[in-house]
C-alpha cells in the first residue's frame, strides 16, 4: 500500500518515473489563482446559465449555490437539473451525475505522478477543486516541467469561487425572466449540450459511440417514459467503444 | 421572494450531497486507483467516450422532438461552437436563431 510507505521513499520512487519533484507552497497557490482567473471568468458565464436553468427547474437560489459549492462539475450539474422533477428522481439524478463524471476517474489518475508526491491531505484536498478547465491548465503546466504542486489547488479555488457566485447571480436573475419560450430560452440547455458536443468531438473515432448513443437514446425515449434514455444512450455509446476497441 | 430564494429543502440538499459524493469519488477515485489497479486500455477507451455519449444521448431526443426552428438553431449553434469554441457566443447564437426562426417559420 502506497499510503503506508514513508513519504521520502515514495518521493524517490515517483521521481524515478521521469517526473520532476513537486512542492506545495503559498506562492504556487497564488500563481494558480492568478493564472486561473481569466479561465474562471469564462466559466462564470456558464455558471450564470446553470443558475437560470436550476432556478427554472425549481431549485432555490441557495440550493443552486449549494450544488455548485459541493458538486463542482458543470456538465453533470446541468444534466441533473434538467432531470429535476417533483418528486426528485433520485436514482436517475445521482447515477447520471456519476456517469457524466466518470471521465474524472481518468483525469484524476493522470494527476497521480505529481500529486502522488504530496501529503495526502494536500493531494485529496486539491482534487476536490478540479474541473475540466483548471485540470487542463494544471496538467499543461506540470507536463511542461513546473514543480508547482499547488497550482491545481489555486486555479481550482478561483474557479470554485466564481462558479458559486455566478450560479447565485443566474438563479436570482432567473426569477425575473417570464415565459422562457418567448425568448428562445427553452433552447439554452440544448444549445449548451450541442456546444459541449462540439468540444467533445474527437473526429471519426467519435462516430461509432455517438451513433450508438443517439440510436439507443431515441429508441429508449420512444418506449420508456422518463429520462432513462440518457443513461441507456450513454452506456450504449461506451459499450460500442469497448466492443469495437482495437489494441 | 427573499425567503423563497434562501430555502434549503432537506430532501433537495440530500440529493445534492449524494451528487457531490459520487463526483468526489470519481475525482479522488482515479487518483487513488492508479497507485493500486491497472485499467485495461479497452475499459479506458470506454470511459473516455462517456462524456460525449452522455451529451449525444441527452440532445438527440430533444432535437428529434423539435421542429424546423430547433434544427436550424442547432446547426447554427454547432457551426459557431466549432468555429469559435466560445460557449457564450454559441449559446447566444442558438437562442437568438431559435427565437427568430420561430417567429418566421
Image: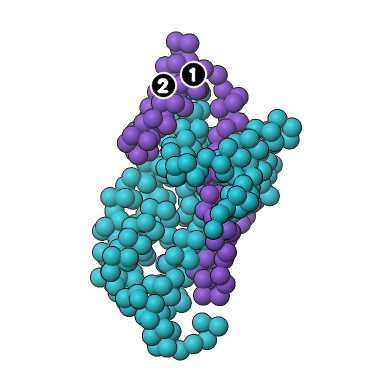
Q: Residue furthest front?
A: A247
Determine the residue positioned at 33% across, 50% down: A40
Determine the residue positioned at 44% across, 45% down: A202
Chain of residue at mark 1:
B
Q: Is residue A93 left or right of residue A72?
A: right
Q: Using the numbered discs, state the Cα–Cα distance from disc 1 to disc 2 in whole angstroms.
A: 8 Å
Question: Contact, CB < 8 Å: mark 1 with mark 2?
Answer: yes
Which disc, if any, is residue A186? none
Quick one: which chain is purple? Answer: B
Q: Secondary structure at mark 1?
A: helix
**Which residue carries the number 2 mark?**
B97
Determine the residue positioned at 34% across, 71% down: A149
| Residue A84 visible | no
| Residue B43 visible | yes
Q: State the residue in front, A36 or A158.
A: A36
Q: Total marks drawn?
A: 2
**Which residue carries the number 1 mark?**
B69
Q: State the residue in front, A215 or A204.
A: A204
Q: Secondary structure at mark 2?
A: helix
Relative to A181, say whether A10 is above or below: below
Quick one: which chain is cyan? Answer: A
Q: State the residue in front, A116 or B24.
A: A116
Amino acid at each position: 500500500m502506497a499510503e503506508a510507505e514513508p513519504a521520502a521513499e515514495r518521493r524517490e520512487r515517483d521521481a524515478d518515473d521521469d517526473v520532476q519533484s513537486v512542492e506545495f507552497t503559498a506562492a504556487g497557490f497564488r500563481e494558480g489563482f492568478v493564472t486561473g482567473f481569466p479561465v474562471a471568468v469564462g466559466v462564470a458565464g456558464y455558471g450564470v446559465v446553470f443558475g437560470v436553468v436550476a432556478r427554472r427547474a425549481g431549485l432555490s437560489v441557495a440550493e443552486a449555490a449549494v450544488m455548485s459549492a459541493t458538486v463542482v462539475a458543470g456538465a453533470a450539474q446541468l444534466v441533473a437539473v434538467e432531470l429535476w422533477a417533483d418528486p426528485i428522481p433520485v436514482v436517475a439524478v445521482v447515477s447520471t451525475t456519476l456517469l457524466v463524471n466518470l471521465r474524472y476517474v481518468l483525469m484524476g489518475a493522470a494527476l497521480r505522478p505529481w500529486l502522488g508526491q504530496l501529503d495526502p491531505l494536500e493531494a485529496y484536498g486539491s482534487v476536490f477543486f478540479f474541473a475540466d478547465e483548471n485540470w487542463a491548465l494544471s496538467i499543461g503546466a506540470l507536463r511542461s516541467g513546473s514543480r508547482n504542486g499547488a497550482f491545481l489547488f489555486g486555479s481550482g479555488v478561483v474557479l470554485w469561487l466564481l462558479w458559486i457566485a455566478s450560479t447565485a447571480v443566474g438563479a436570482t436573475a432567473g426569477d425575473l425572466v417570464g415565459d422562457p419560450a418567448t425568448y428562445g430560452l427553452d433552447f439554452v440547455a440544448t444549445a449548451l449540450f450541442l456546444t459541449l458536443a462540439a468540444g467533445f468531438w474527437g473526429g471519426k473515432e467519435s462516430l461509432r459511440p455517438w451513433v450508438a448513443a443517439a440510436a439507443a437514446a431515441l429508441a429508449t425515449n420512444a418506449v420508456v417514459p422518463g429520462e432513462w434514455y440518457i443513461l441507456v444512450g450513454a452506456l450504449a455509446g461506451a459499450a460500442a467503444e469497448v466492443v469495437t476497441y482495437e489494441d | 421572494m427573499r425567503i423563497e430564494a434562501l430555502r434549503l429543502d432537506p430532501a433537495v440538499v440530500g440529493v445534492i450531497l449524494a451528487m457531490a459524493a459520487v463526483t468526489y469519488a470519481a475525482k479522488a477515485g482515479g487518483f487513488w486507483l492508479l497507485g493500486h489497479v491497472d485499467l485495461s486500455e479497452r475499459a479506458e477507451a470506454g470511459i473516455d467516450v462517456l462524456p460525449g455519449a452522455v451529451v449525444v444521448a441527452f440532445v438527440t431526443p430533444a432535437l428529434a422532438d423539435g421542429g424546423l426552428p430547433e434544427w436550424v438553431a442547432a446547426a447554427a449553434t454547432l457551426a459557431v461552437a466549432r468555429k469559435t469554441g466560445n460557449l457564450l457566443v454559441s449559446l447566444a447564437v442558438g437562442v437568438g436563431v431559435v427565437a427568430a426562426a420561430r417567429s418566421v417559420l
